[in-house]
Image (tube, rainbow, N blue to C red):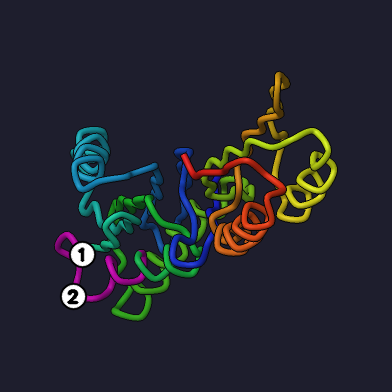
């Protein structure tokens, strides 16, 4: 399952590994994909693939990270630009970050040429990326509001308007609600809550 994040600027996050195989003119291309949130993760995954394919001719790779925004690739001995860049391009086309793709090649005795290598590595990377499912996931920020009972209905409507999932309510001398707000909606929620507090309709609110 590959996870996508909001807002724009963080396109997606891979949370599952996958493997595929592709044969082209006797050469075997094995695509490997895994979650990688750091350079250390990427190095560890590459080491794992290399250990499992010690007899392979090449283990070409690429990865993209979200924080900080980073991307790297390697041709691992293939002609310059024929392997790492096509793999990185496939990752970019997927719209995801925090993942690494390694494509292992066992040479079959028939040369593919520059164009053939570019297409083969790009296809192998695209195949392994496409193998996993996808689900939308939003980045959020936790919000807490203290309010009188007579304004609960208005606050509920506001939270629903901004796509809040399952707010948690507490009831005592006053009402209190905690909710997860999409980061993309946080600026508008801030304006709405500042207005409610300025009008004396809620006691307080804060981002946690």
Q: Position of residue 155 (x, y in %)?
A: 76, 46
Report, in whole angstroms, how far the alpha carbon at label 2 lies from the one at label 1.
6 Å
Please indicate whether residue 21 sits to the left or right of residue 113 in the image.
Answer: right
The residue located at (62%, 46%) in the rendering is 133
Q: Is residue 124 visible?
A: no
For mark 2, what is the residue?
80
> CB atoms at circles 2 and 1 under 8 Å apart?
yes
Dot label at residue 61: none
Q: Residue at x 71, y 29 (%)?
A: 175
> Dot 2: few (<14), some (14–19), or many (≥20) neighbours within 10 Å?
few
Q: Residue furthest bottom?
A: 115
Residue 200 vertical position relative to residue 17 in the rendered view, above or below: below
| Residue 141 in the image: above or below residue 107 | above
* In-front residue for pair 26/10: 10
SS at circle 2: loop
Q: Tell me: 203 left or right of 206.
A: right
Q: Which numbered marker is on residue 75?
A: 1
Sequence-first disc among 2 and 1: 1
* Residue found at x 21% / y 37%: 44
Q: Position of residue 65 (x, y in %)?
A: 32, 55
23 vs 12, nearest the viewer: 12
Q: Magenta segment range?
A: 73-87
Whether 86 is among the magenta residues is yes
Q: Position of residue 7 (x, y in %)?
A: 53, 61
In the rendered image, residue 82 lying in the magenta stretch gets the answer: yes
Q: Residues within 10 Å of mark 1 (few under 14, many from 20)?
A: many
Q: Is residue 13 above or below residue 203?
A: below
On the rendered image, what quadrant is the N terminus found in? top right
For the residue labelled by badge 1, is the local secondary structure a helix, a strand or a loop? loop
């Amino acid at each position: 399952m590959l996870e996508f994040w909001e807002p724009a600027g963080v396109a997606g996050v891979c949370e599952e590994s996958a493997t595929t195989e592709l044969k082209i003119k006797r050469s075997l291309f094995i695509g490997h994909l895994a979650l990688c949130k750091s350079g250390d993760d990427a190095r560890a995954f590459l080491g794992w693939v290399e250990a499992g394919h010690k007899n392979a001719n090449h283990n070409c790779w690429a990865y993209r990270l979200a924080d900080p925004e980073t991307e790297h690739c390697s041709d691992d001995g293939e002609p310059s630009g024929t392997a790492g860049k096509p793999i990185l391009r496939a990752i970019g086309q997927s719209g995801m970050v925090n993942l690494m793709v390694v494509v292992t090649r066992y040479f079959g005795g028939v040369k593919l040429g520059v164009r053939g290598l570019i297409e083969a590595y790009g296809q192998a990377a695209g195949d392994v990326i496409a193998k996993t499912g996808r689900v939308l996931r939003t980045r959020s920020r936790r919000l807490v509001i203290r309010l009188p009972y007579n304004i609960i209905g208005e606050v509920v409507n506001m939270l629903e308007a901004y796509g809040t999932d399952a707010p948690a309510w507490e009831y005592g001398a006053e009402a209190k609600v905690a909710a997860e707000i999409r980061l993309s909606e946080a600026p508008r929620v801030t304006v709405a809550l500042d207005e409610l507090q300025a009008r004396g309709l809620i006691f307080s609110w804060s981002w946690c």
